[in-house]
C-alpha cells in the first residue's frame, strides 16, 4: 500500500492546432489505505486524471508520486498499480483461472505462488466454482468480479477503478457496490475510483472529489459534500432529486424570490449569510428539507403540479408563487395534482450561495 500525491497536474490536448485543457492543476494527497472517488459529469476530466495516475496518459505538467517515488516518467507496468476498466477485457479463450493468473504468468512467477494467489482471490470474490469456465459462460456480474480478481492477485500498492459498474444492470450494480465496499474493508489497499454515479460515490468513498470542466470543485467526505456543498454545481450534482435553487434577496427576516414573488420567512434560528442584506443570493433547499404541514401551520403555500409515488417515498413537483420546487416525503402521500398544500423549512434546511460567483456563503 502507498499514498498517492498529485501536485498541480495538468493535461493539455492539441485539437485542430488549438490547445484543449482537459485537467487544470489537479492537486490532491490520498492517504495510505484511503478510498477516494472522483465524480462528475462526462468530460469533466476524472478518467483522464485516473489514466495519468496509471501512466496510460502522459502529463503536461505537475507531479504524480506513488509512495515516495515520483512516477512522471515511469512506465505504467512499473508503477505497481492495478486497474479495473469499464469493459471487462477478459481473454475469451482462457478459463477464469487462467484469466486471474495471466499477469502473474507473464511475470514468470512460480506456479505454486500463482495458484495460491488465484485461490485466495477466487475465495474472496466467490469465484471458486467458476474457475474452469470460459468468460462467455459467465453473467455480467461474474465477469466483473473476475476483472476485479485479476487486479487483486497482483497485490499492487494502488487499485484504480474506471467506472467498473457502468455496464451492469441496476440490481447487479447494487450487489457489486456492496462487494467492492466489503473488499476494500478486507484488503485496505489505497484506491482511486472513477464514476459519474453519485450513489456509488456517496456509498464507497472515504472522500469524494467533485470535478467539472477539468477543475476540482470540492474535496470532502460524502456527508460533508452533501451537507456543505461548496457551490451550486456541487449542490445540484450530489443528491437525488437535486437541491432546489432559488435566486432572490433577504429583506426584513424573509427571503424574497426574484421572480415572480415567493416569500419565505426565516426562522429565528436559521443561519443568515454574512453581508447578504440587499445583494442577490441563491437559496438552496434540499427536497427532503421541505416539510409538509397542516393547513394554517406552514410558512408558505404551494400547488401540486406532479406526483411521483415511489413506494418508500413520494416526490412532489410544486408551484410556489411561480417558483418550481421539488419535495421528497417519506412513504406514500395521498395528494392530487392541483391540490394546495403548506410547507415549512427547518433552521437546518437553509443553504446560501453568492448570486454572482455561485459559491457557498458562510
Image: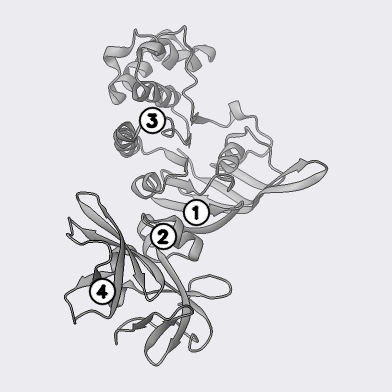
Tag 2 secondary structure: helix
Coordinates of residue 41 in the picture (x, y in percent):
52, 48
226 lies left or right of 46: left
Q: Foreground: 275 or 8?
A: 275
Residue situated furthest right in the rendering: 17
Point out the tag, 3 or 4, that comes first from the N-terminus.
3
In this picture, residue 188 sits left or right of residue 161? left
Residue bearing the label numbered 3: 168
Give the colour scheme of this rendering: one colour
Q: Residue at x 37, y 50 (%)?
A: 202
To which quarter of the image does residue 126 belong? Answer: top left
Mark 2 vs mark 4: which is more N-terminal?
Answer: 2
Q: CA distance from mark 4 to mark 1?
A: 32 Å
Residue 258 shown left or right of residue 184 in the figure = right
Which mark sits nearer the N-terminus, 1 or 3?
3
Residue bearing mark 2: 225
Q: Quadrant of residue 254?
A: bottom left
Mark 2 to mark 3 CA distance (whole Å): 26 Å
Query: Circle 1 sits on which residue?
Result: 210
Q: Which is more toward the observer, 86 or 41? A: 41
Res. 343 mark? 4
Q: Nearer the viewer, mark 2 or mark 4?
A: 4
Question: Where does the image place residue 206, in percent across and percent down from the top left?
Answer: 38, 50
Q: Quadrant of the N terminus?
A: top left
Mark 4 vs mark 1, foreground winner is 4
Q: Residue at x 77, y 41 (%)?
A: 15
Amino acid at each position: 500500500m502507498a499514498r498517492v500525491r498529485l501536485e498541480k497536474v495538468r493535461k493539455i490536448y492539441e485539437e485542430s492546432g488549438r490547445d484543449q485543457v482537459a485537467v487544470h492543476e489537479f492537486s490532491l494527497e490520498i492517504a495510505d489505505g484511503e478510498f477516494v472517488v472522483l465524480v462528475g459529469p462526462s468530460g469533466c476530466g476524472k478518467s483522464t486524471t485516473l489514466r495519468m495516475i496509471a501512466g496510460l496518459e502522459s502529463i503536461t505538467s505537475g507531479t504524480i508520486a506513488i509512495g515516495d517515488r515520483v512516477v512522471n516518467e515511469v512506465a505504467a507496468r512499473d508503477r505497481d498499480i492495478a486497474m479495473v476498466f469499464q469493459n471487462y477485457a477478459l481473454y475469451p479463450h482462457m478459463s477464469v483461472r487462467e484469466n486471474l493468473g495471466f499477469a502473474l504468468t507473464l511475470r514468470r512467477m512460480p506456479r505454486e505462488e500463482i495458484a495460491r494467489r488465484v485461490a485466495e482471490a477466487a475465495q474472496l470474490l466467490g469465484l471458486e466454482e467458476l474457475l474452469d469456465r470460459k468468460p462467455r459462460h459467465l453473467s455480467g456480474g461474474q465477469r466483473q468480479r473476475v476483472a476485479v480478481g485479476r487486479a487483486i492477485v497482483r497485490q499492487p500498492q494502488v487499485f484504480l477503478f474506471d467506472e467498473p459498474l457502468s455496464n451492469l444492470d441496476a440490481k447487479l450494480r447494487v450487489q457489486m457496490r456492496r462487494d467492492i465496499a466489503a473488499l476494500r474493508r478486507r484488503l485496505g489497499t489505497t484506491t482511486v475510483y472513477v464514476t459519474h454515479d453519485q450513489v456509488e460515490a456517496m456509498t464507497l468513498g472515504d472522500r469524494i472529489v467533485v470535478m467539472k470542466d477539468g477543475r476540482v470543485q470540492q474535496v470532502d467526505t460524502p456527508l460533508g459534500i452533501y451537507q456543505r456543498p461548496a457551490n451550486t454545481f456541487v449542490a445540484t450534482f450530489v443528491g437525488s432529486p437535486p437541491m432546489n435553487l432559488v435566486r432572490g434577496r433577504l429583506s426584513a427576516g424573509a427571503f424574497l424570490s426574484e421572480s415572480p414573488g415567493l416569500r419565505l420567512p426565516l426562522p429565528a434560528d436559521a443561519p443568515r449569510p454574512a453581508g447578504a442584506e440587499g445583494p442577490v443570493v441563491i437559496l438552496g433547499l434540499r427536497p427532503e428539507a421541505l416539510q409538509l404541514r397542516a393547513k394554517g401551520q406552514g410558512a408558505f403555500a404551494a400547488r401540486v403540479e406532479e406526483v411521483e409515488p415511489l413506494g418508500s417515498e413520494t416526490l412532489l413537483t410544486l408551484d410556489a408563487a411561480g417558483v418550481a420546487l421539488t419535495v421528497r416525503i417519506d412513504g406514500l402521500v395521498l395528494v392530487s395534482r392541483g391540490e394546495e398544500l403548506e410547507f415549512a423549512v427547518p433552521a437546518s434546511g437553509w443553504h446560501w450561495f453568492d448570486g454572482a460567483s455561485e459559491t457557498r456563503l458562510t
